[in-house]
Image (cartoon, rainbow, N blue to C red):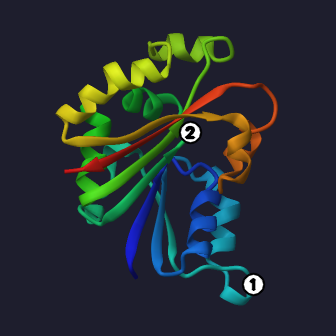
């Protein structure tokens, strides 16, 4: 295997399955605390290859704060696609309880790619419950990025992502979000030091 990819908050696991299928030389691990969403995809993943299975994927039930110690220092790349609830809060507010375990599972120089967004008009109750700030490129650059850099994460790229760009992204949630309301999402790439 030429590397390990970890998808934190994998949801239904489709991202892991798609990436594992596209990159058979990588080992892909999906992490999520809820097993229900993973049942269908994990069953397909563990089939024989002739029936659509992939031998280079694994799903782990865990929240980000409790990532298994067996994962320490294994990830070349971490994806966090459309985090929600506590994971979203920890990411956006750059909380140590969220970021320390992520850094712990990364190799030196690993990339952490985050695709996220929320809208004050559509998720007002959730944002109020989590006490999240209005999200913008300015917030990410001027508030979030300095906090992440203090934690040893180098900001490599920040950019806005239009909903229609999500149609080709290998995530079932991205495909759902690409249609409907026209809203802005953000892509943030970090690298561990």
The residue that disc 1 covers is: 51
| Element class at badge 2 | loop
Residue at image coords 19%, 41%: 152
- CA separation, marks 1 and 2? 29 Å
Task: Give x and y (percent) for residue 154.
Answer: 26, 42
Closer-to-camera residue (126/141): 141
Task: Give x and y (percent) for residue 27.
Answer: 45, 74
Task: Give x and y (percent) for residue 131.
Answer: 44, 12
Closer-to-camera residue (184/11): 184
The answer to which image quadrant residue 20 occupies is bottom right
Residue at image coords 75%, 84%: 51
Rendered image: mark on residue 164: none
The answer to which image quadrant residue 71 occupies is bottom left
The residue that disc 2 covers is: 82
Whether residue 57 is visible: yes
| Element class at badge 1 | helix
Closer-to-camera residue (130/1): 1
Residue at image coords 38%, 79%: 2
- The answer to which of marks 1 and 2 sits earlier in the sequence is 1
Q: Is residue 45 left or right of residue 62?
A: right
- The correct choice, above or below, for 169 with respect to 19 in the image is above
For marks 1 and 2, give the one nearer the viewer: 2
Task: Give x and y (percent) for residue 140.
Answer: 40, 25
Whether residue 94 is visible: no
Residue at image coords 59%, 31%: 185
Question: Crowding near pointer 1: few (<14 within 10 Å), some, many (20+)?
Answer: few
Q: Is residue 91 left or right of residue 120?
A: left
Query: What quarter of the picture does the N terminus occupy?
Result: bottom left
- The correct choice, above or below, for 79 with respect to 128 in the image is below
Question: Crowding near pointer 2: few (<14 within 10 Å), some, many (20+)?
Answer: many
């Amino acid at each position: 295997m030429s590397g390990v990819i970890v998808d934190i908050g994998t949801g239904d696991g489709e991202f892991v399955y798609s990436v594992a299928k596209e990159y058979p030389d990588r080992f892909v691990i999906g992490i999520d605390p809820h097993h229900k969403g993973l049942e269908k995809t994990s069953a397909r993943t563990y089939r024989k290859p002739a029936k659509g299975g992939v031998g280079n994927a694994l799903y782990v039930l865990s929240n980000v704060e409790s990532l298994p110690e067996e994962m320490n220092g294994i990830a070349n790349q971490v994806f966090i696609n459309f985090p929600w609830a506590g994971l979203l809060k920890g990411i956006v507010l750059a909380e140590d309880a969220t970021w320390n375990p992520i850094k712990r599972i990364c190799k030196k120089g690993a990339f952490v790619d985050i695709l996220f967004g929320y809208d004050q008009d559509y998720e007002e109750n959730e944002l109020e419950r989590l006490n999240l700030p209005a999200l913008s490129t300015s917030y990410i650059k001027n508030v979030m990025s300095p906090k992440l850099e203090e934690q040893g994460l180098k900001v490599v790229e920040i950019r806005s992502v239009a909903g229609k760009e999500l149609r080709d992204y290998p995530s079932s949630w991205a495909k759902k979000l690409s249609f409907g309301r026209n809203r802005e999402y953000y892509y943030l790439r970090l690298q561990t030091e």
